Image: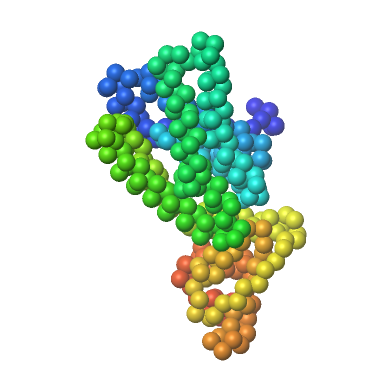
Amino acid sequence: MMGGSRPRTAVRIHPFCAVLGALYFAAGMLDRAAAAFGAVLLHELGHVAAAHRAGARIAKVELFPFGGVARLEGMENLGPAREISVAAAGPLTSLGVFCLGLGASHYGYFKSETGQFFLTVNLLLAIFNLLPGLPLDGGRILCAWLARKRGLGAASLLAARLGQCTGLITTVLGLLGPIWGRWGLDVAAVGLFVLYAATREKRYVPYLFVRQLMAKERELFRHRVLPGAVLVALEEAPIIEVARLFHPGRFHLVVVTDELGRKKGVLNESEVTVALTTLGVGTRVGSLLKKRGKGKQG
């Protein structure tokens, strides 16, 4: 293999997706299952292509009935605009496929029931994935937009909770569908999958948060200069509460004070990041300052 070749992206079909495919097969609608799978795969390929153009890499794509969850490498070095472009690429791809197919239908293509179903799935993927909740693309767009203002941890947590709400509401509407005579229970299944995936994204938030902090430290060494910001924290403040205020693209200094506002010392962002992974999220900034002092004396 040539050294300049791109690393491959692993594609994994989640068991839930396989179960839904089996249900379609049992109902004699295997052609619809294939059409839905093809639409989801095209949606995710849109993300992969956009990530490559932005300078990031999707290490793994996990396919769900509502779309996919992509694990990206190198996104820490991208700005919000590029993050949004990668997230929006999936819905735009699905919408583009729908528009092209709709145009082709005037020339005799996609006229079959399966073809029409394929176009409908693409349109629904584009619309549904723009809802503002993780792991949907709209949730990733919301994260990128909010991260600069609230920090990645708080933005991701909010988007994951919105994703759980989206999954719950979709499940309830899906269960009511047969009663109203509107749609089948497959909508409820999609809602359950979104609820499950959003809950998993919520558990992934601390790891994502720490990984971004460590990536910013590497960025400082690479560029040698980053914009700075100063935070003020009482000695009793947990380091996780301080770290949640760290914003991407800035390197922070933390001024530690007592209850009377008297300065006790200064911590830098790297010290707080290391303490998160070695001492635990509940460590107080004051005790971290004392540990550093004892270490210097030793």
Give the residue at x 45% y 71%: 282
Residue 75 horizontal/vertical position (percent) = 61, 47
Give the residue at x 59% y 64%: 246
Left or right for 172, reference 207: left
Residue 255 horizontal/vertical position (percent) = 62, 77
Q: Is residue 68 visible?
A: no
Q: Is residue 200 above or below residue 217?
A: above
Residue 8 horizontal/vertical position (percent) = 57, 32
Give the residue at x 61% y 58%: 148
Q: Is residue 159 visible?
A: yes
In which quarter of the view is residue 57 placed? top right
How was the colour assigned to the protein in this rendering? rainbow
User: What quarter of the picture does the C terminus occupy?
Assistant: bottom right
Residue 122 horizontal/vertical position (percent) = 48, 28
Q: Is residue 241 above or below residue 34?
A: below
User: What quarter of the picture does the N terminus occupy?
Assistant: top right
Front residue of 160/98: it is: 98
Front residue of 180/217: it is: 180
Q: Is residue 41 above or below residue 101?
A: below
Front residue of 19/59: it is: 19
Left or right for 208, reference 16: right
Q: Is residue 146 above or below residue 16?
A: below
